[in-house]
Amino acid sequence: MYIIGDIGNTDIKVCLVNKKNKIIKKKIFNTNKVSTKYLYKNLNFLLKHKKLIKKAIVCSVVPSKYLILKKFFKINLSIKCLELKSLNLDKYIKIAVNKKQVGSDRIANALSVIDNNNNYIIIDFGTATTFDVVKKNRYLGGIIAPGVDMSLKNLINKASLIPKVKLTKSKNILGKNTKDAVNSGFYWGYIGLINNIIKLIIKDSKSMYKIKITGGFAYLFKNSIEYICELDKDITLKGLIKLL
């Protein structure tokens, strides 16, 4: 058995994977809550499999939380917790940029889609909205835009007359009140951003792509994007499984 984990700015996912590389247990918790005591409470299901777990591989964009998780695995499971970037990735994917400047989660996303026949754009609606470009088995680079949720919360916090808004799919362009106007601006504004960036990537690279989307708000935008796209909420975890 193996452990894989995705340590993000908002959430952490820890999964137990069997010898057939199938996820048999997944735990998701808030990144800010993570402490040694918290892990004991929420990852105790791993202890019953202690003798069967061989290793742990995670991708992390929060170093301090990775260290806590790494220590937990060493003390309680007697295994090393390896961070994706510490591995030799050359046999899996060719990275055409400075690896240190690309988030581990984005590399894991790229790993999940690589094949010798297709090109991919991966859009991740996380704390930031990221676009990553993979041609065959080569990672070419990406784009980082402000995250939908973070931008919306920042506007609400900074503008005293803006009410709390839960982003939903907007049918009308023109809002009849402040709440609807904000919702429309964010929903259609991000649709415009997404469509335009995809168009520019295609134009710049003179190539066509399959498009994968993931992250918290992916479901909301899926059917309004001008290009055919596939929603895959576990794309990061699938990339990590390829490294087992």
Image (cartoon, rainbow, N blue to C red):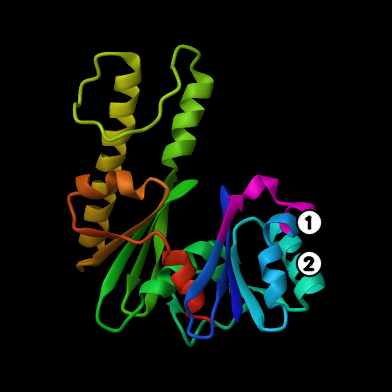
Q: Is residue 4 left or right of residue 232?
A: right
Residue at 58 percent across and 66 percent down: it is 5
Crowd tier of the residue under label 2, counting other residues whose Cα lies within 10 Å: few below 14, some 14–19, many 20 or above: some
Label at residue 71: 2
Magenta span includes 88: no
Residue at 49 percent across and 77 percent down: it is 241
Q: Relative to residue 167, is residue 122 depicted above or below? A: below
Query: Disc 1 to disc 2, how far (Cα)?
Result: 8 Å
Query: SS of the residue at dot 2?
Result: helix
The residue to which callout 1 is attached is: 36
User: Toward the viewer: 150 or 14?
Assistant: 14
Counting the numbered discs, the total is 2
The earlier-in-sequence mark between 1 and 2 is: 1
> Tags 1 and 2 in contact by the CB under 8 Å rule?
yes
Measured as percent of width and height from the top left, residue 197 is found at: 28, 51
Magenta span includes 29: yes
Q: Relative to residue 19, is residue 154 depicted above or below? A: above
Q: Is residue 163 left or right of residue 9?
A: left
Measured as percent of width and height from the top left, residue 149 is found at: 45, 37
Say which amino acid is labelled 2: Lys
